[in-house]
Image (cartoon, rainbow, N blue to C red):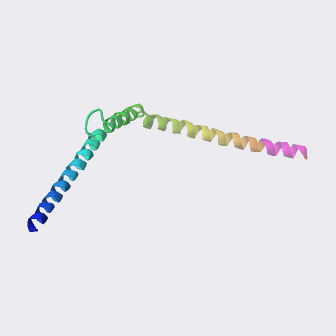
Amino acid sequence: MEVILMLATIVAVVLLVIVLVTYLLKIIKLLNSIGGAGDSYLAKLRLGLRAIETETGHLPTEVTKLNKGLSATAEGLVVVNNNLAETITAVVNQKV
C-alpha cells in the first residue's frame, strides 16, 4: 500500500511539473511577442514614440513665440474693447 501511495505521489509531482513547464513556456512565448525581439509590439511602439518625439521636438521653442504673439493680440483686443465701450457710451449719450 505504501508503494502505491509513493508512486501516486511521484506521478502527481511529475504531472505538476509538466503543467508548470508548459504554462511557463507559453508565458515566455507571449512575453517575447510583446517585447523580446526587434519586430515585437513593444519595439514598434518605441519606434512610434521616438518618431512623435522627433516630430514634436520643435514645439517648445515655437510655443513661446506663439505665446508672445497671443499676449500682444490680447493687449490689442483690450484696447479695441475699451474703444468700443467708449463708442457705445458716446452713441448712447448722443441719443439722449
Residue at image location 14% in from the left, 62% down from the top: 9
Q: Quadrant of residue 52?
A: top left
The residue segment tinted magenta is 87-95
Name above or below for residue 6 compared with residue 78.
below
Q: Quadrant of residue 10?
A: bottom left
Residue at image location 73% in from the left, 41% down from the top: 83
* 54 in magenta: no
Residue at image location 86% in from the left, 46% down from the top: 93
Q: Hey, which residue is sitting farthest front in the picture? A: 1
Q: Position of residue 8 (x, y in %)?
A: 15, 61
* 89 in magenta: yes
Name above or below for residue 6 compared with residue 74.
below
The residue closer to the viewer here, 10 or 18, is 10
Q: Position of residue 70 (x, y in %)?
A: 57, 38
Residue at image location 71% in from the left, 44% down from the top: 82
The residue closer to the viewer here, 56 or 74, is 56
The residue closer to the viewer here, 64 or 13, is 13
The residue closer to the viewer here, 78 or 42, is 42
Q: Position of residue 7 (x, y in %)?
A: 11, 61
Magenta part mainly helix, strand or loop? helix
Left or right of 41 in this view: 7: left
Left or right of 12 in this view: 66: right
